């Protein structure tokens, strides 16, 4: 059976209000089974400035510096620099973690 995307999205949104766990579980499974879709959704949100590089990396299960390198390879523009103190702290922690991993390798 072919279901139109518009119909499906409309009814998933309605169903999510009534049974959020059911819809969340189904969507999570879909994204886990289709990494290209997950990648595309996260990159779209990043390019729309809805999430930062750190959040994108977290959602993709990657280290932020690893994702930064991948973006450079793919020509995806980087938004460099923290937007606030919390992001600056998170970047400092990511760098510290990255260098700790490199030193123990």
Image: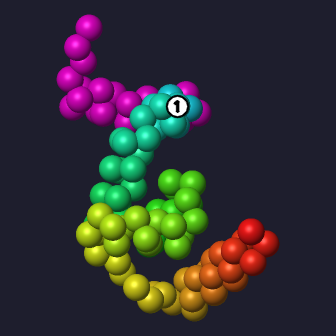
Pinpoint residue 25: horizontal percent, then vertical percent: 56, 32
105 left or right of 66 in image: right
| Quadrant location of the N terminus in the rendered image | top left
Q: Relative to residue 42, is residue 76 depicted above or below?
A: below
**Could you tell me if residue 17 is visible in this image?**
no
Q: Secondary structure at mark 1?
A: helix
Magenta: main secondary structure equals helix
Q: Magenta stretch? A: 1-24
| Quadrant location of the C terminus in the rendered image | bottom right
Residue 12 forms part of the magenta stretch? yes
Residue drawn 75% across and 78% down?
103
Residue that extends furthest to the front in the rendered view of this protein: 105
Question: Label 1 crowding class (10 Å Cα cut-off): few <14, some 14-19, many 20+?
Answer: few
State the residue in front, 82 or 64. 64
96 left or right of 33 in image: right
Pinpoint residue 80: horizontal percent, then vertical percent: 40, 85
Residue 103 forms part of the magenta stretch? no
Pinpoint residue 11: horizontal percent, then vertical percent: 33, 28
State the residue in front, 70 or 7. 70
Residue drawn 51% across and 67% down?
66
State the residue in front, 75 or 103. 103
4 left or right of 93 in image: left
Q: Which residue is mark 1?
A: 29
Q: State the scheme by which the image is colored.
A: rainbow
Q: Quadrant of residue 83?
A: bottom left
Residue drawn 55% across and 28% down?
22
**Could you tell me if residue 62 is visible in this image?**
yes
Q: Relative to residue 49, is residue 11 depicted above or below?
A: above
Pinpoint residue 3: horizontal percent, then vertical percent: 24, 18
């Amino acid at each position: 059976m072919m279901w139109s995307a518009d119909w499906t999205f409309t009814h998933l949104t309605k169903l999510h209000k009534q049974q959020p766990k059911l819809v969340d579980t189904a969507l999570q499974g879909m994204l886990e089974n289709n990494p290209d879709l997950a990648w595309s959704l996260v990159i779209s949100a990043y390019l729309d400035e809805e999430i930062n590089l750190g959040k994108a990396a977290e959602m993709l299960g990657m280290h932020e510096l690893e994702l930064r390198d991948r973006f450079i390879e793919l020509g995806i523009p980087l938004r460099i620099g923290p937007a606030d103190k919390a992001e600056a702290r998170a970047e400092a922690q990511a760098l510290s973690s990255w260098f700790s991993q490199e030193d123990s390798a």
